[in-house]
Image: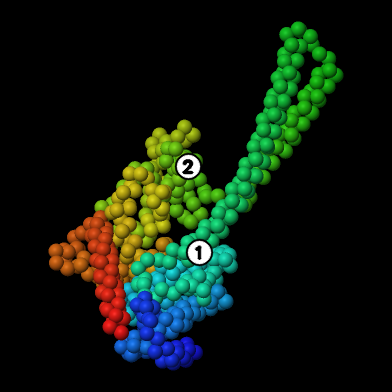
Amino acid sequence: MTHVSSCFSVESHMLSCQKLSNVKACRIVNCHIAFECFMSYRYNFSINLEYFRSFACGAAAAEIARAFCMEAAMVGRELRSNWAGLEFARKAIGQCLPQRDLDWDVESKSGNPVRSSQVRCLMERIRSMEKVKAGDVAVLPMDAPAAYDVGDDSTARPHSPPVEADGGATSQALLRKMHARNVQFFHLVQTMDSTIRTLSKSVQQMKRLLEIHNLQIRNEIQTGANGLEDGVVPSLSITMDHHSTTASLVSRLKEEEAGVTEALQHLTNEEDIASQPVSMDAVSVRLGPDGYCTFYNEIGKAMDLPEGFELPTCDLVDAWSVWLRGFPNHKFRMPKTATTDEEQETLVDAPIKPLRDMKLGSIPLTLKKKYKDGWRPILQSMVTDVAHMLEGVPPAEMDDSFINATFNAAMEALIHKAPALFEGKNERNKSWKVATWSRKIREQQLGSKGAQRRSLGDTAQAKEDEDVAMVEQL
C-alpha cells in the first residue's frame, strides 16, 4: 500500500497548487488519465474527475505520471532479480499486466495502458525459462526476463491507448536475441569450416598416395612383364627375392592407405554419424532424429513436403488434425536407382511433420499459396486460443479424443472472437472447407482492425476537444 499513500501525498500537493491558473491543456490530459489508470487498475479506486480536474496542475501531473511509471516497472525489476522464479513470473503476468490491448477501455479509461506486445515478449521469455527448467533447451541468462517494458527513466504516455507496440524496447530485445543466435551460428560455421579443411587435406593426401602407389605398382608390373618377354627365366633365389620385395611393397602400401583411411573415418565416425539423421536415400528423402522426414528436390534443397505432394481439400476438423499431427502414415515412393535390383519403385514410410511447425521457405512453390492463404490463417488463429492445451504434448500422443477436445475449445474461442462468422448467411459454416474458413477469418480481421482504428481515433479526438474546452472555461 505504499503506492496508495504516495498518491494521496500527490493529492495534498494538488491542493497546495490549486491557486495556479496557468495550466496547460496537455498537462491536464496527462494528469487525470495517469491518475485514473494508476488508481482504477491497481486499487479499484473511484476518482471524482470534476474534483480532480479542478485542482490539477503541471507539477502534480509529473509526479503522478512518475508514480504510475514506477509501479509498472516493479514487475520487470522483480522478474530480473528472480528470473528463475517461474511461479512468480506467471503470477505477475496474470495479475499485473494485460494479455490483450482490449484490456484498455477508452471510454471509461479503465485498465492498464501497458502495451500487450511487451507482455507477449515477457511471456515468450517465461516459456523459455520453463524449457530450461525442464531441461529441453539451454538458454543464456541474457535471454531471461528483463525489465525493459517500462524503466524508471522512461517517458510515461498514459494518455495514448496501446494500439502499437513500443518499437524501441522490442527492437532492443530482438537485437539481443539475434546477436546471441548469430554468435552460436558463427561458432557452428567455424567448426564446420575447420572440419572441411581437415577433410580436404586428408583427401588430397590420399590422392597423392594412391598416385604414387599406382606408379610403383605399374613399374613393378612392367618390370616383370619385360623379363618374360625377353625369355629370361629367373633363378629361384632371384624369384624369391623379387617376391619378397613385392610383398613388402604391398604391405607398406596397405599400411599407408590404412592410415589415411582411418584419419578420414575419424572425421565422420562415432558421435558425428550418430548425430546425423538416418538416410533412406542420398538424394530424395532423409529421416530426421525427430521421427519426421526431410525431402530433397532436384537441386538438393531440403523441404518439409515432397515435390508433387497435394494438400487435401478437407473440412476444418480434418485440417486441424493435420495441423497438429501432420501425416504420420505418409508413404513415399522411392525412385528406382542404378544401385538397386528392383524393377519397380518401392514405397517407404516417410512421416511428415505437423504443418504448424513448418516454415514457408521449406514448402514447395506449388503449395506455398494454398498453405499461406488456404490453411494458415484460420488454423493459426485457432492455435493461439488453445496454446495452453497443446503445450508439452508431443504429436505422437495426440489421439482422436485430444484432437476433438482442442478443436471444440478452439471453436468456442473463435465464436467469441469472431461472432460474425456464425451469424446470418455464415450460419451454413458447417459445410465450409478449410480454405473458406481462412478467407472468412482474413476478411473479418481486416474489417475489425479498420473499424477499431477509426473508433479509437474518434474517441481520442472527442476527449481531447472536451478537455481543451474545459480548460478554456477555467
The amino acid sitting under disc 2 is: Asp
Which mark is on residue 229?
none
- Determine whether, in the image, residue 9 is placed left or right of residue 230: left
User: Comparing marks 1 and 2, which lies closer to the viewer?
Assistant: 1
Residue 46, compared with residue 117, is above or below; it is: below
User: Could you tell me residue 470's position as x and y percent?
Assistant: 28, 82
* Quadrant in the picture for residue 243: top right
Which mark is on residue 281?
2
The residue tagged 1 is 173
Element carrying mark 2: strand
Q: Nearer the viewer, residue 431 or 96?
A: 96
Residue 104, compared with residue 13, is above or below; it is: above
Question: At x 50% / y 63%, what residue is drawn?
Answer: 172
The amino acid sitting under disc 1 is: Ala
Q: Nearer the viewer, residue 462 or 140?
A: 462
Residue 193, compared with residue 314, is above or below; it is: above
User: Could you tell me residue 374's position as x and y percent?
Assistant: 28, 54
The mark tally for this picture is 2
Q: Residue furthest left?
A: 425
User: Could you tell me residue 300's position as x and y percent?
Assistant: 46, 40
- Determine whether, in the image, residue 425 is placed left or right of residue 136: left
Q: Nearer the viewer, residue 94 or 283?
A: 94
